[in-house]
Image: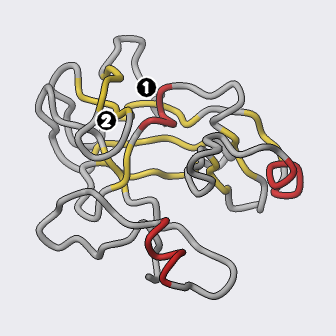
Amino acid sequence: MARPTNRRLYCVRNSGIHGRGVFAATTIRRGALIVEYRGQRTTWEIVNERPDSDPANPHHTFIFETSDGSVIDGGRRGNAARWINHSCAPNCDSFEAEDGRVYIEARRTIPAGEELTYDYRLAYDGRITRKIRAAYACRCGARRCRGSLLLYP
């Protein structure tokens, strides 16, 4: 598998979707590996004991779960990938390689200046109440927005 190039394909700046965002610094071709999602590898138990990354918004997280049940905490030793926002009509996909590393890849050609997004497909354990729905409301603005960062709103 090809690794992301050393040439910086992206930059981080303020986003119209939410907070900070990651934007194409140059045209990115379909299938290009853009960035690895990095951070401290740990367990859900440890992550759940930590203080929230944003005390004003406890549902804002930089946690990426891997297939073996461990997590990558982008809030600890993370990189720019943690700022990639969700969209219901994303231009990127996330995938886990055989070695357990997580990458962000272009779904289509992305012109310079466009914000990079992928579908978070968040799962929520517990009853999904109005308050939870509001906490995970989607702001992507896609024509077919499902209204939630949750996979099953």
For the residue pair 131 and 126, the one nearer the viewer reads as 131
Residue 74 x/y as whole percent: 63, 36
Mark 1 surroundings: few (<14), some (14-19) or many (≥20) residues within 10 A: some
Question: Residue, x 63% and y 88% (percent of image)?
Answer: 127
| Element marked by disc 2 | loop
Residue 50 against residue 121 in the figure, above or below:
above
Q: Does the rendering let one see residue 18?
A: yes
Question: Residue, x 22% and y 42% (percent of image)?
Answer: 30
Mark 2 surroundings: few (<14), some (14-19) or many (≥20) residues within 10 A: many
The residue under label 1 is which amino acid type?
Pro
Residue 1 x/y as whole percent: 49, 37
Residue at the extreme front of the image, as rendered: 56
| Element marked by disc 1 | loop
* Colour setup of the view: secondary structure
Label number found at residue 61: none
Q: Does the rendering let one see residue 99?
A: no
Residue 114 is left or right of residue 94, and the answer is left
For the residue pair 58 and 74, the one nearer the viewer reads as 58
The residue under label 2 is which amino acid type?
Ala
Mark 2 to mark 1 CA distance (whole Å): 8 Å
Question: Residue, x 52% and y 33% (percent of image)?
Answer: 36
Residue 84 is left or right of residue 59, and the answer is left
Residue at the extreme top of the image, as rendered: 7
Please give the residue where the numbered disc 1 appears in the rendered image.
Answer: 4
Mark 2 vs mark 1: which is more N-terminal?
A: 1
For the residue pair 120 and 17, the one nearer the viewer reads as 17
Q: Are marks 2 and 1 in contact (CB under 8 Å)?
A: yes
Residue 114 is left or right of residue 99, and the answer is left
Residue 45 x/y as whole percent: 88, 57
Residue 90 against residue 82 in the figure, above or below:
below
Residue 58 x/y as whole percent: 63, 53
Please give the residue where the numbered disc 2 appears in the rendered image.
Answer: 32
